Image: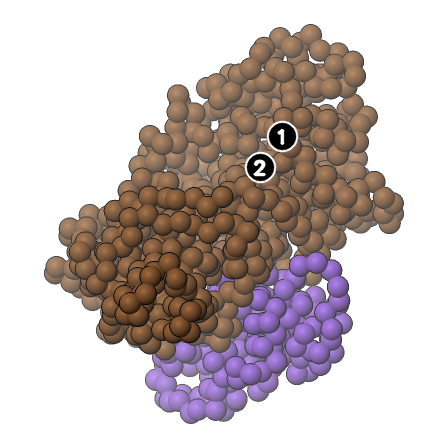
């Protein structure tokens, strides 16, 4: 049995310790907000926070997450500035990658509350959005960071 | 002018009379808390197949188009709300079940989403549905108050009698309205009176998608469900020769290893054991006739074909004669590769198959076709199969497969294991799974007169038909020409007196399919690059050259003109930067784009800015139009810069995002979108943003480097060579 603390709640799961955290979260805990996109840490759809740091859960064996604080998209408050900014900037299209984008942004702003454009490029480039919502993600990050979005038409 | 439109029985079926009540109420997403699921079912007023109003004032709109990011779960309710005069905050959305009432209004007897047609094809249908419901609510109120219907009006979810100050909510009127007959005719609003259509409206599905609660196909679950991954042949058309399931069966969590027509399914308690089981599986494949397939060989076969005349798609005047007699001849060959759709959500399908019924949860664009194919595979009647359309984590055409590959396969797996099962594709399965945008090879020539103006244009296209062998043959293939192979080429807009476009459609063993913007994804690149070549050959400005050849196409000219103006066409740029322009009509809309590009000393291409102008007729939700243009630019840019599926020894060489890359945040250009105000009928927005970006970028690369890109993708640092 492996003991996990996800969104503040303890879970005991009976899985092989090399099972990726992603599939434990989705198939065993039943939290499906965290998405499967590539299975090789190429797309960022499975991003969760482990002790506050953004990690690709598809490449994290569940044994490495034991005893650590795991946060998924469901564990981020609906009034969190990042979620609020995602709504106010109307970011999602299909929406599939957005859990990962949001989790990556939560981690980004925690460690770097006033990211530069270069910081955003660097830290968000691990998360693919096939619908191409990057421009709005950028705006939402600025909004969440309290930096007034610069002009320019939508 | 208000219009009186007769409402046909087909448009306005009384649920009780025709649909049998239960059908409309039959579906909610498997997550009960979902705001997209359906409250308001008690004592509800369901005047037609698209609207249900509960006594709790909740207005549920049943949307028969699949939500794959393009915003139909908002824009289609806007059409109804405009006429219904309901309270927008009380609207909930449900996906439609499979039923004739939900068939596409332009496609014949099938329900589906594609061809950028959702708004266009529901524009009258949904507004009429809303208007009819409003009239019935007013009738119910007027009857209660014993006043004339004409003295009542509806506003924000209430029917109001101004003279007496009386008002009743839609919910309060629902029961009474539900026994009324629908009106025989309705008068639709004048556009000048629109309160919702044309106003930027927040998407209804945003909160769910931000919270993580949104349910995609891959998230669907039913009790007792197993998960399967399928080992498919490494070569298209291959078959299982022998397999040994022994090692697989030993893996904890693996329940069954079963052969299905498409390969060997490993069925387990979850995705991870299923995947491990597949890795342990020993399969020997009969590779079949495509074992020798290679991109190199295909390319030379296509190049040879392009030198022979194909089936005529368009012929005006005498192109070859006029080219021979012209002052200057220019010719070029263009080529583009196979492309995978690579939706962010890998393909998946959940099937619960019982003796006498089958329920399917999946993100599909083709409900009726999938339902019928599933019934055939399950050995059931069509009406015994129910499809629950979940949200789609991207579609781009991949989830609109006339062969229903991912649905039929899942039915076969469920049939073999006799338990509900969800088949999940890995990213590798998805990239290597076929149904690609075809590879194309184009040979194109033109003749210029002494003023540098084109007098003849000859274009030969080589590539597979995506339609051949499907149920769409009759509609799409005319006189041996698959219209989707030549769209954008046979109707290219430039004023050239002699024109010939012909087509070769070789049979190749690679499954092909529509890919966002279909034929236009390739023809726009060729036509808009070659017209640029002609402009440069004639020593004319590419923008002015285009404008001078578009006398018969004012909407092309208008988008070009605004794009050039907004991009500051002709104004100075930093060293190493250049601009390229392109215009293309697709799905009824007109889009011009100007790309600003730089090329480094190392040959690295960077797209800094794209100005995009669209004329899509009347706009329903402008914010969606902006979003879809941004999206189309990025989608087309990924393909132009990086996208290629290639073959060697019958095998696809790409497998995941490391070798089939996408534009990422650091490559994202600034995209500026402008919408041309229009009162024309609304047209497509999901796809038309894609076609112009590849030629705009490549024309900009030429402006910077003098190097003409005639083969995509451009590649990373590909200009060094």
Report the chain shown in brown: B
Disc on the earlier residue, 1 or 2: 1
Circle 2 chain: B
Q: Dot 2: within a 10 Å radius of its alpha carbon, few (fewer than 14), some, or many (20 or more) residues?
A: many
Closer-to-camera residue (B657/B201)? B201
Residue B597 % position (x, y): 76, 47
Of circles 1 and 2, the one toward us is 1
Residue B340 % position (x, y): 49, 48
Seen in the image, is B448 located left or right of residue B15?
Answer: right
Q: Quadrant of the C terminus of chain B?
A: top right
The image shows residue B370, relative to residue B162, as above or below, that is above
Q: Residue at x 28, y 42 (%)?
A: B109
* Quarter of the view holding residue A4: bottom left
Seen in the image, is A54 located left or right of residue B69?
Answer: right
Seen in the image, is B353 located left or right of residue A108?
Answer: left
Residue at which label 1 appears: B553
Marks 1 and 2 on same chain: yes
Closer-to-camera residue (B359/B9)? B9
Identify the secondary structure beneath mark 2.
Answer: strand
Q: Residue B585: give its label.
A: 2
Q: Residue at x 41, y 64 (%)?
A: B154
Spatial CA distance of label 1 from label 2 is 10 Å
Q: Residue at x 28, y 45 (%)?
A: B8
Identify the secondary structure beneath mark 1.
Answer: loop
- Mark 1 near mark 2, Cβ–Cβ under 8 Å? yes
The image shows residue B452, relative to residue B168, as above or below, that is above
What color was chain A assigned in the picture?
A: purple
Residue B293 % position (x, y): 45, 36
Rendered image coloring scheme: by chain
Circle 1 chain: B
Asked whether residue B88 appears in the rendered view, the answer is yes
């Amino acid at each position: 049995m492996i003991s996990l603390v996800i969104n503040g709640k303890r879970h005991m799961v009976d899985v092989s310790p090399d099972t990726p955290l992603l599939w434990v979260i989705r198939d065993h805990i039943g939290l499906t907000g965290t998405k499967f996109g590539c299975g090789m840490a190429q797309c960022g759809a499975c991003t969760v926070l482990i002790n506050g740091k953004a990690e690709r859960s598809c490449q994290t064996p569940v044994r490495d997450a034991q005893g650590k604080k795991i946060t998924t998209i469901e564990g981020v408050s609906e009034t969190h500035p990042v979620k609020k900014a995602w709504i106010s900037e109307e970011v999602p299209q299909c929406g599939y990658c957005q859990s990962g984008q949001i989790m990556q942004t939560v981690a980004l702003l925690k460690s770097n509350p006033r990211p530069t454009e270069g910081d955003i490029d660097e830290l968000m480039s691990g998360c693919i959005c096939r619908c191409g919502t990057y421009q709005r993600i950028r705006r939402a990050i600025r909004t969440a960071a309290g930096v007034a979005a610069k002009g320019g038409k939508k | 002018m208000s219009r009186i439109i007769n409402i046909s029985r087909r448009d306005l079926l009384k649920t009780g009379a025709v649909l049998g009540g239960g059908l409309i109420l039959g579906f909610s997403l498997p997550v009960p808390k979902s705001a997209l699921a359906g409250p308001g079912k008690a004592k509800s007023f369901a005047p037609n197949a698209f609207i249900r109003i509960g006594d709790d004032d909740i207005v549920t709109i049943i949307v028969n188009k699949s939500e794959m990011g393009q915003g139909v779960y908002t824009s289609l309710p806007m059409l109804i709300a405009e006429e219904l005069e309901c309270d927008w905050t009380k609207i909930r959305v449900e996906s439609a079940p499979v039923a004739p009432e939900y068939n596409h209004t332009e496609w014949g007897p099938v329900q589906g989403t594609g061809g950028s047609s959702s708004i266009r094809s529901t524009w009258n249908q949904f507004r009429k549905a809303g208007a009819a419901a409003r009239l019935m609510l007013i009738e119910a109120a007027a009857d209660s108050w014993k006043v004339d219907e004409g003295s009542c009006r509806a506003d924000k979810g209430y029917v109001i009698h101004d003279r007496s100050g009386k008002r009743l909510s839609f919910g309060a009127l629902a029961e009474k309205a539900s026994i009324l007959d629908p009106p025989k005719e309705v008068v639709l609003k004048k556009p000048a009176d629109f309160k919702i259509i044309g106003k930027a409206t927040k998407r209804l599905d945003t909160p769910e998608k931000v919270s993580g609660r949104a349910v995609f196909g891959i998230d669907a679950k039913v009790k007792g469900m197993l998960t399967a991954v399928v080992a498919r042949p490494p070569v298209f058309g291959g078959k299982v020769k022998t397999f040994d399931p022994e090692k697989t069966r030993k893996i904890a969590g693996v329940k069954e290893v079963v052969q299905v027509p498409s390969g060997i399914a490993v069925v387990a308690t979850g995705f991870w054991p299923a995947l491990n089981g597949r890795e342990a599986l020993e399969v020997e494949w009969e590779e079949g006739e495509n074992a020798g397939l290679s991109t190199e060989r295909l390319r030379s076969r296509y190049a040879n074909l392009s030198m022979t005349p194909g089936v005529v798609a368009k012929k005006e005047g005498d192109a070859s004669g006029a080219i021979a007699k012209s002052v200057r001849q220019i010719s070029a060959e263009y080529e583009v590769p196979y492309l995978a759709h690579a939706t962010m959500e890998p393909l998946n399908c959940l099937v619960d198959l019982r003796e006498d019924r089958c329920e399917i949860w999946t993100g599909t664009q083709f409900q009726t076709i999938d339902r019928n194919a599933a019934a055939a595979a399950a050995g059931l009647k069509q009406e015994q199969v129910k499809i629950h359309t979940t949200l789609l984590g991207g579609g781009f055409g991949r989830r609109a497969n006339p062969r229903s590959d991912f649905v039929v396969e899942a039915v076969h797996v469920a049939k073999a294991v006799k338990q509900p099962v969800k088949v999940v594709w890995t990213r590798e399965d998805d990239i290597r799974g076929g149904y690609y945008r075809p590879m194309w090879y184009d040979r194109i020539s033109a003749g210029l007169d002494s003023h540098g103006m084109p007098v003849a244009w000859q274009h030969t296209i080589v590539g597979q038909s995506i339609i051949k062998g499907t149920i769409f043959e009759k509609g799409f293939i005319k006189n041996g020409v698959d219209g989707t192979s030549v769209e954008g080429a046979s109707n290219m807009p430039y004023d050239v007196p002699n024109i010939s476009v012909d087509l070769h459609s070789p049979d190749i063993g690679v499954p092909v399919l529509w890919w966002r913007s279909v034929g236009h994804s390739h023809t726009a690149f060729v036509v808009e690059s070659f017209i640029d070549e002609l402009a440069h050959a004639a020593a004319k400005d590419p923008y002015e050259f285009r404008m001078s050849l578009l006398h018969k196409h004012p909407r092309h000219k208008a988008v070009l003109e605004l794009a050039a103006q907004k991009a500051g066409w002709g104004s100075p740029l930093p060293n190493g930067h250049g601009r390229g322009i392109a215009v293309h009509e697709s799905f009824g809309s007109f889009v011009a784009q100007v790309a600003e590009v730089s090329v480094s000393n190392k040959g690295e291409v960077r797209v800094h800015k794209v100005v995009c102008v669209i004329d899509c007729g009347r706009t329903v939700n402008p914010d969606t139009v902006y979003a879809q243009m941004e999206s189309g630019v990025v989608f087309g840019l990924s393909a132009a810069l990086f996208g290629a599926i290639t073959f060697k020894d019958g095998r696809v060489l790409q497998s995941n995002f490391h070798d089939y890359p996408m534009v990422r945040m650091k490559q994202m250009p600034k995209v500026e979108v402008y919408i041309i105000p229009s009162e024309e009928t609304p047209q497509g927005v999901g796809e038309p943003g894609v076609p112009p970006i590849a030629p705009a970028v490549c024309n900009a690369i030429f402006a910077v480097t003098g190097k003409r890109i005639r083969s995509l993708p451009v590649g990373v640092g590909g200009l060094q060579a």
